[in-house]
């Protein structure tokens, strides 16, 4: 399979980022454990918060919301991922006319019928992910928060593109950001590695 120079660089950067965070998870650690006990009242409040967090850990609600948001995201974006894969395969791999015809038909079905699920399920997944964030507590890494910020930005960009809420020039920039492999890869890496460190 021939990979273009642009995608080769993106893959290399992602591999380096993932390897660095995997080998040195302390780089993504939050600084809660380094704060000094400057005030007894603050420390006492922190203990109360910790007790609430421990109670939340016993409550499995955050796991349910996490799984629900994960599978909603998968369902919302599986057809998009397949479309990108098929377009890349059609472009870089020599395929027969029958397979190219199948890819073209899938692309038509994707645009006509499947995109409605993308429009509905992604905002739903974002809402559930927000609830999941509120029910969960992670003091070991800030990566899940950054992943949630990226997800929020992607949904916002998609909403703006769908309803054409920005001028045409801005729309083009938003479209590139929303559909760019770089943005999707960064968001996925942040969410996956953040949750791996948490677990």
Image (cartoon, grey):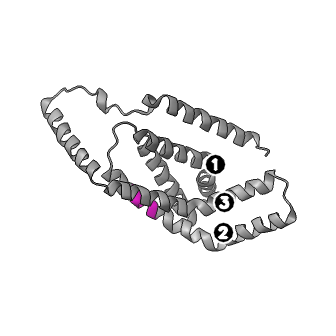
Mark whose residue sits in front, 3 or 1:
3
Image quadrant where residue 68 sits: bottom left
Q: Which residue is mark 1?
A: 181
Q: Is residue 131 left or right of residue 8?
A: left
CB atoms of marks 3 and 2 within 8 Å? yes
Q: Is residue 124 left or right of residue 14?
A: left
Where disc 2 sits, the SS reads: helix
Rendered location of residue 124, percent (x, y): 44, 64
Q: Can residue 61 be seen in the rendering of this structure?
A: yes
Rendered location of residue 35, percent (x, y): 27, 28
Residue density around tag 1, few if under 14, some if 14–19, many if 20 or more, within 10 Å: some
Rendered location of residue 141, percent (x, y): 40, 37
Report, in whole angstroms, how far the alpha carbon at label 3 lies from the one at label 1: 13 Å
Query: At 53% from the left edge and 59% from the top edge, which residue is drawn?
Result: 74
Query: At 20% from the left edge and 37% from the top edge, which residue is drawn?
Result: 46
- Judging depth in this view, the residue of 173 and 103 nearest the camera is 103
Q: Which residue is mark 2?
A: 110
- Residue located farthest toward the bottom when viewing the structure as drawn: 113
Instruction: Indicate which disc, 1 or 2, sits on the residue closer to the N terminus.
Output: 2
Report, in whole angstroms, how far the alpha carbon at label 3 lies from the one at label 2: 9 Å
Image quadrant where residue 27 sits: top left
Q: Which residue is mark 3?
A: 82
Residue 61 in the image: above or below residue 138: below
Q: What is the magenta range?
A: 124-129
- Judging depth in this view, the residue of 121 and 64 nearest the camera is 64
Instruction: Indicate which disc, 3 or 2, sits on the residue closer to the N terminus.
Output: 3
Mark whose residue sits in front, 3 or 2:
3
Residue 104 in the image: above or below residue 8: below
Residue 121 among magenta residues = no
As drawn, the label of residue 168 is none
Residue 83 in the image: above or below residue 17: below
Report, in whole angstroms, how far the alpha carbon at label 1 lies from the one at label 2: 19 Å
């Amino acid at each position: 399979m021939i990979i273009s120079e642009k995608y080769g660089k993106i893959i290399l950067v992602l591999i380096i980022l993932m390897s660095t965070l995997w080998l040195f998870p302390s780089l993504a650690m939050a600084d809660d454990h380094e704060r000094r006990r400057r005030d007894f009242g603050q420390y006492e409040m922190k203990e109360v918060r910790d007790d609430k967090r421990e109670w939340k850990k016993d409550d499995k609600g955050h796991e349910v919301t996490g799984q629900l948001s994960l599978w909603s995201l998968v369902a919302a974006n599986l057809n998009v991922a397949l479309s990108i894969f098929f377009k890349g395969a059609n472009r870089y791999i020599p395929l027969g006319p029958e397979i190219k015809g199948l890819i073209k038909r899938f692309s038509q079905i994707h645009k006509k019928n499947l995109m409605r699920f993308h429009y509905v399920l992604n905002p739903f997944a974002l809402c559930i992910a927000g609830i999941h964030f509120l029910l969960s507590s992670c003091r070991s890494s800030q990566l899940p928060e950054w992943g949630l910020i990226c997800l929020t930005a992607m949904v916002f960009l998609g909403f703006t593109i769908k309803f054409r809420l920005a001028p045409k020039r801005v729309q083009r920039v938003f479209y590139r950001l929303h559909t760019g492999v770089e943005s999707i890869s960064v968001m996925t890496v942040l969410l996956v590695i953040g949750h791996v460190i948490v677990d």
